[in-house]
Image (tube, helix red, strand yellow):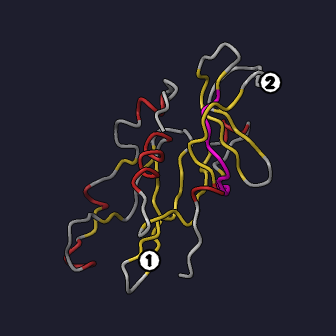
Amino acid sequence: MNVRHPLTIFNILGVFSMFKTYRHAELSPAAVFGGGVASYWQFVELEVHHPWFYIELVRDYGDDIVGSMLMVPTVPILQQMLSELDERSWFGQAHLMSPGHLRGGDNWKMEPLIEVGVAQDNKGEVEGYLFKVAGGVSYRTHHSRDHSNLKVTEIIFSADRDLRAYGG
């Protein structure tokens, strides 16, 4: 997949860290988790109000299968993660976390993700992303008033293709 991603604020900011952390919120890994290379936080902060993904990453360690939840900030990072999956690691579930303004409301909402695609207008200009969620609802990241002439030029994520069940 070699997609030219729309130049949007959340793709620009995707280069930077999306979740803000504070030293006073960091948990001591040695005291709580027995050391290791990871950092652990009591909480993280989200400053930018754009869609992001809550994804279950499942890992098969041979003698154990373990799922953990990831907070993925942008479509390009989701796409990169998809390219790195293999037989021993896969996505078990995916949700879109959408801010109210994307849906014409006020509150954040988490919905099962069905599809993420790049939407383009009839002039061939990339307009933004199209997110399809359970229940047949779709959301778009561009600000064009006329959505009738948009077509999806590439499917970046498809639940049918990219999710895999496991017995854990």
Snapshot quadrant of residue 70 = bottom left
Q: Position of residue 137 (x, y in %)?
A: 77, 45
Helix, strand or loop status at disc 2? loop
Secondary structure of residue under mark 1: strand
Whether 115 is among the magenta residues is: yes
Q: Residue at x 62, y 45 (%)?
A: 98
Q: Measuring from the top left, give residue 86's x and y in whole percent.
A: 42, 62
> From what the image shows, is residue 138 above or below residue 69?
above
Numbered mark located on residue 66 in the image: 1
Left or right of residue 63: residue 10: right
Q: Residues within 10 Å of mark 1 (few under 14, many from 20)?
A: some
Whole-percent x and y of residue 62?
Answer: 37, 82
Whether residue 62 sits left or right of residue 140 in the image: it is left
Residue range of the region highlighted in magenta in the rendering:
110-119
Question: Could you tell whether 106 is left or right of 125 in the image?
Answer: right
Name the residue tied to disc 2: 148
Query: Marks 1/2: CA distance?
Result: 43 Å
Residue at x 61%, y 23% (from the top left corner): 127
Q: Nearer the viewer, residue 99 or 83?
A: 83
Classify 10 Å Cα crowding around label 2: few (below 14), some (14-19), many (20 and above): few
Q: Identify residue type, mark 1.
A: Val
The amino acid beneath tag 2 is Ser
